[in-house]
Image: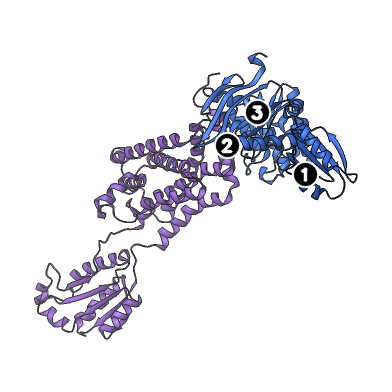
Amino acid sequence: MSQPRLSFHRLWAIVLKEFIQMKRDRVTFGMMVGIPLMQLLLFGFAINSDPRHLPAAVHLADTGPFARTLVQALRTSEYFDVVHVAETDAETRRLLQLGEVQFVVNIPVDFTRRLLRGERPTVLIEADASDPAATGPALNAVAQLANTVFNRDLPGPLAHLQAQNGPVDFRIHAHYNPENITQYNVVPGLMGVVLTMTMVIITGLAITRERERGTMENLLATPVRPFEVMVGKILPYIVVGYIQVTLILLAARFIFHVPMVGSLPLLYAVSLLFIAANLAVGITFSTLAKNQLQAVQMAFFFFLPSILLSGFMFPFRGMPEWAQAIGSCLPNTHFLRIVRGILLKGNGLAEISPEIWPLVLFLAVAMTIGVTRYRQTLD
Amino acid sequence: MSASDLAIDVTGVTKRFGAKTVVDAIALQVRRGEIYGFLGPNGSGKTTFIRMLCGLLTPDAGSGTCLGFDLRTQQADIKRHVGYMTQKFSYYEDLSIRENLDFVARIYAIPDRRAAVQNSLARLGLEKRGDQLAGQLSGGWKQRLALAACLIHSPRLLLLDEPTAGVDPKARREFWEEIHQLAAGGLTVLITTHYMDEAERCHRLAYLAYGRLLAGGTLAEVLASARLFTWSVAGPDLHALAATLRGRPGVEQVTAFGNTLHVSGRDAAGLDATVAALRDPRHEWNRIPAGLEDVFIGLMDSAKDNFA
């Protein structure tokens, strides 16, 4: 009468059943393919974190040649589209308030005169900092501009004005920490975000659905063991996870031309850990949740810090320490570093290993909680 | 009766949920090959008791065996040899009939799975509908599927929790034919029901109320043990007569059955005296044997006095 702890018959029965149910549930299946595609397009195309051609107004109080040169230089930088040349402060303030322009460049009355005297005239740039990510790169460009723009116009005896600090003092009215995010950074990061979202939600539903529909009672009355149910429910979604990874990598390569310096097999191998970790979280949630709605709510509870504190949205080192501590507990934080490391920096196993063991630890903890929480009886 | 003749042999089985005792010290012996009916009002503990028998719940007190396996320590063995049909349809509605059967067959690691599934479909006449989704089936067909699924691993004990609730009379009759055939083949069946006609189809039955076993035995034994005496009365103004009868000496139950009233009580002398006093030529009075329903309602009323 004795039997092995794990029966492959039973495990396989669950795996097959999950696949059939997945096939039947068109909406969920669509979500699994649709979410990566949608997020890729949104984050990859629509959300451009190095925006150019931002509308700007120039308040030109000085009509000297250097002022005009500066305006021209702003235009040619591609970051600014000078859509207004304003007459008064009130007008520029209104434009900024309405959001019709992102920047106002104020060139003071005695700009040319003070420049020639070497007094480093002040140019005030007012930025609409409500979206710092949008203004950051443009402001960086301004700083670059300042050093070089007048080089041609300040020849011979005036060359001493090409000081180290630049002949013009640009003052910027906006305080934030500009991170130079590019698609190269976003698209690989998206892999962790997409996997976290879909894997946790879908498996979060896996056991609550059985309970809600009453099929759990039947399952419990059979000889199936908790571990078999959990693994049987996880395996099919690992396949789904790999489909998502492949979709994102293909898009990264062929749509966004993200360089892939490192080893793809290594990336695929490490992805397994991350996918399994998220699935285990989902399964654990579904043993805690009373119904499917609660499971989805829990999944979002997990998803938000995974997207906000992992370094995907905001630079990890820019966060306060407590936020970094939370972030370090999340698998996505480590996976992001792994993916970016492998793809962009060409990291090998040795370089990514500090990020691997937190994933392993997380997976072990989540699995343990899940198996412990799953009851073999209805008690 | 030797122990090996008993499919179920338990004593003192008790289950509490919080402060509420749902099943209270039940002792039950069911012989192999027997169809045992379990009756009782909603919430009387029938489902909880069945769940303990099939290893879904662990009893708080009591002991015993199910198919010779210990109720507390050998739940895994019990699960392998028991077929349990839940009250609510609990197979996968998004799987087809065949897929559901195939799933169950895999879970139990049945050797020739394909043949087993095919046989199961054939025996219940579900062959042509094998590829239909279970969720699209009517109540009667769902019940047949559930029965087929919990028989696929050839269990030695079948636990059926209100299997015929919401099933039409013809399907119910066919269902009982099947149950009797299975029992004739040596399968033990424990079945809960609210229908009195079904109770009468069982070899033996038990009545459960407030978690306690109130009566048990064959139909005749249960009827006899109740010591209930019944008069049937036909004629005009039965509604008024019923109102007059209620509360009179010896009268415990007055129940309308179409054009007749059943008047029952355990005190035969008192009942007869009341009937004699109220008798008039407009009504036709007959002494009849007490029905199972009268007996059970009587049991429930007295149980309420004792426990509630």
Location of the N terminus of chain A by quadrant is top right
Residue A116's x, y, as percent?
A: 12, 79
Dot 2: element? helix
Residue A267 is left or right of residue B239, and the answer is left
Q: Which chain is blue?
A: B
**Chain A, which colour?**
purple
Kind of residue at disc 2? Glu
* Circles 3 and 1 in contact, beta carbons < 8 Å: no
Residue A10's x, y, as percent?
A: 55, 30
Front residue of B193 and B253: B253
Dot 3: element? helix
Residue A250 is left or right of residue A13, and the answer is left
Residue beneath label 1, please? B245
Mark 2: few/some/many CA within 10 Å (<14, 14-19, 20+): many
Q: Chain of mark 1?
A: B
Residue A27's x, y, as percent?
A: 56, 52
In 3D space, how far apart are the residues under numbered discs 2 and 3 (Cα atoms)? 23 Å
Q: Are marks 3 and 1 on the same chain?
A: yes
Residue beneath label 2, please? A217
Mark 1: few/some/many CA within 10 Å (<14, 14-19, 20+): many
In 3D space, how far apart are the residues under numbered discs 3 and 1 (Cα atoms)? 63 Å
Kind of residue at disc 3? Arg
Q: Which mark is residue B113?
A: 3
